[in-house]
Image (tube, grey):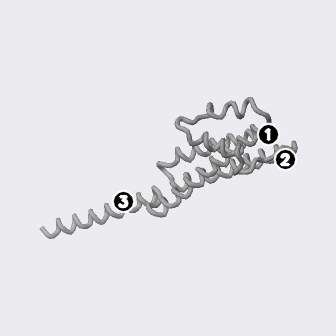
């Protein structure tokens, strides 16, 4: 569980770092982060299953309450701390499931945006090649203009 959580966070950081130089790498690492969080989601579900603890329905009162916390201004770990650190294993695991699902929703949204942006503008290599071609064309026009004079 710890490795999946760490991997998810780390790949988000690495994807963000790669964003300026390689959209392909950014998309790939964001996808890897999503997969790591999916693994973590499965681990928490297994935790509940093996202890015969209930999995909250996404529309349950408790799950909706957790989602509402995420809508508050200045929300941070402190907003969830008491639910995770002082409640029953059932509550803690279900709160984590809610948070992982929220993270996955946001990552999915980010992936759609990145893919759309990549299709629209291409990657750095494409833009550099286009800039090179534009420069060559501009140099060619300048040479032709110079030859005419």
Which residue is pictured at 62% across the width and 47% down the height? 103
How far apart are labels 1 and 2 at the CA level?
A: 10 Å
Which residue is located at x 73 percent, y 38 percent?
A: 2
Tag in front: 1 or 2? 1
Residue on which the image places disc 3: 131
Q: Earlier in the sequence, mark 3 or mark 1?
A: 1
Residue 45 drawn at (x, y percent): 79, 47
Q: In front: 130, or 42? A: 42
Q: Residues within 10 Å of mark 1 (few under 14, many from 20)?
A: some
- Given residues 49 and 42, the one toward you in this image is 49
Residue of label 1: 90
Task: Specify the farthest residue to the front.
Answer: 61
Horizontal and vertical percent for residue 69? 61, 39
Task: Classify residue 146 by image quadrant.
Answer: bottom left
Q: Residues within 10 Å of mark 2 (few under 14, many from 20)?
A: few
Quadrant of the image occupied by residue 8: top right
Rendered position, 132 above or below 100: below
- Quadrant (top left/top right/bottom left/bottom right) for the C terminus: bottom left
Query: SS class of the residue under badge 1?
Result: helix
Which residue carries the number 2 mark? 49
Please tell me which of labels 1 and 2 falls first in the chain.
Answer: 2
Image side of residue 110 versus residue 61, left or right = left
């Amino acid at each position: 569980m710890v490795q999946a959580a760490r991997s998810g966070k780390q790949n988000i950081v690495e994807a963000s770092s790669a964003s300026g130089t390689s959209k392909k790498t950014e998309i790939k690492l964001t996808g890897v982060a999503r997969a790591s969080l999916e693994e973590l989601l499965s681990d928490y579900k297994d935790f509940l299953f093996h202890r015969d603890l209930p999995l909250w329905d996404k529309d349950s009162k408790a799950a909706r309450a957790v989602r509402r916390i995420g809508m508050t201004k200045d929300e941070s770990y402190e907003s969830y701390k008491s639910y995770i650190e002082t409640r029953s294993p059932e509550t803690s695991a279900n709160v984590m499931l809610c948070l992982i699902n929220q993270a996955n929703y946001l990552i999915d949204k980010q992936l759609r945006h990145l893919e759309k942006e990549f299709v629209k503008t291409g990657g750095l290599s494409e833009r550099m090649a286009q800039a090179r071609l534009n420069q060559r064309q501009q140099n060619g026009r300048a040479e032709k203009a110079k030859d005419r004079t």
